[in-house]
Each structure stands twice: as structure tokens, then as C-alpha cells.
Amino acid sequence: MKSIVNRVEVATNHEIELINITPHVVDLVNASGIQNGTVFVLSLHTTTAITVNEGLPDLEADITSMIQDLVPEEKTYRHSLFLPSDGQMGVNAPSHLRGALLGFQVFFPIQDGKMVTGSRQTIYYVELDGPQHRTYVVQILGE
């Protein structure tokens, strides 16, 4: 079995931002030579997420609104207090909680050299504490 690990850098531009990474993931799978296996996509940050949904601007706006409604900035969070472990105030509790709700990884099968996805599925890298420089990993396993 072959394993290929790709680290992908992304610069985000907004506090909350959905970035379509599907074309890049597809390109990595196509270049891998793997015919049958699995592709995993995961974020290396706890204030980001990886999610799948239909790739439409109105849904992107709805997802942004939903996570802001579910985890409002104005609420008092324990992570907004002094953190002895960091020696400073925690200021991004909503970003961590939003990431926990959305999740940090997805995977798809690879069959006959192609990712098996629904016709409208889009893989989003979701920035929740931006703008920042971020990294996600694409691991391709198979033969």
C-alpha cells in the first residue's frame, strides 16, 4: 500500500471564511497514481474546520450565519478568562467551539483513480479565527 502526505498552506483573508479546496484535493488524488484507496483531508488547527456541503454562495453565507448564531461572540466563555497555561487571556473561545461543531476532517474513497463524491459535494476549508496563515493535510492511501 502506498501513502502520500501533502501539507497545503493557505492564507485566509477574513475572520470567518469558507474556501473551496475541492479542485486542489482532486488534483492531488489524480497526481498520486492511486487507483483504489482513500483520501483524508484534515486541518492542523483547532480554530478551523473541514466540512462538505453543496458549493453555492448562498449556502456559504447560511453556514457562516448558522455558526455565528450557534456560538455568538457576545457570550461569556471560560476560555475568555486568564489562562495560566498560556499566561494570557483566552480571546478566541467562539472560534474553538465553532470548529468543534463543524469538525476537522473528511474522507472520500478513491475508485478507479477518481474520488468518489456526490455530484454537488464541495470540500471547504473553514477559517474561524482569521485572517491567518494555515495548513491542512491531504493523505492519500491505496494502491
Image: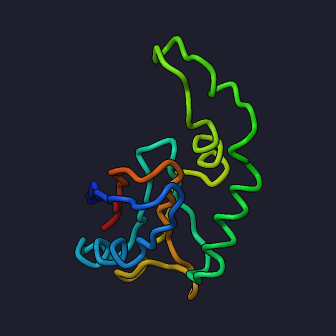
Name the residue rendered at 38%, 83% in the picture.
112
The answer to which of 93 and 104 lies nearer the viewer is 93
Does 44 sit above or below residue 10? above
Q: Position of residue 96 (x, y in %)?
A: 59, 40
Residue 24: x and y in percent read 33, 73
**Can you tell which quarter of the image residue 120 is in?**
bottom right
Classify residue 131 as left or right of residue 62: left
Foreground residue among 110 and 5? 5
The picture places residue 39, in percent across and down from the top left corner, at 41, 64
Image quarter (top left, top right, bottom left or bottom right) of the C terminus: bottom left
55, 3: nearer the viewer:
55
Q: Residue at x 56, y 79 (%)?
A: 121
Q: Left of 79 or right of it: where is 137?
A: left
Quarter of image, res 27:
bottom left
Residue 60, compared with residue 48, is above or below; it is below
Identify which residue is drawn at 54% across, 22% down.
Answer: 89
The outermost residue toward the bottom is: 119
Q: Is the residue 21 above or below the residue 47 in the image?
A: below
Q: Nearer the viewer, residue 84 or 120?
A: 84
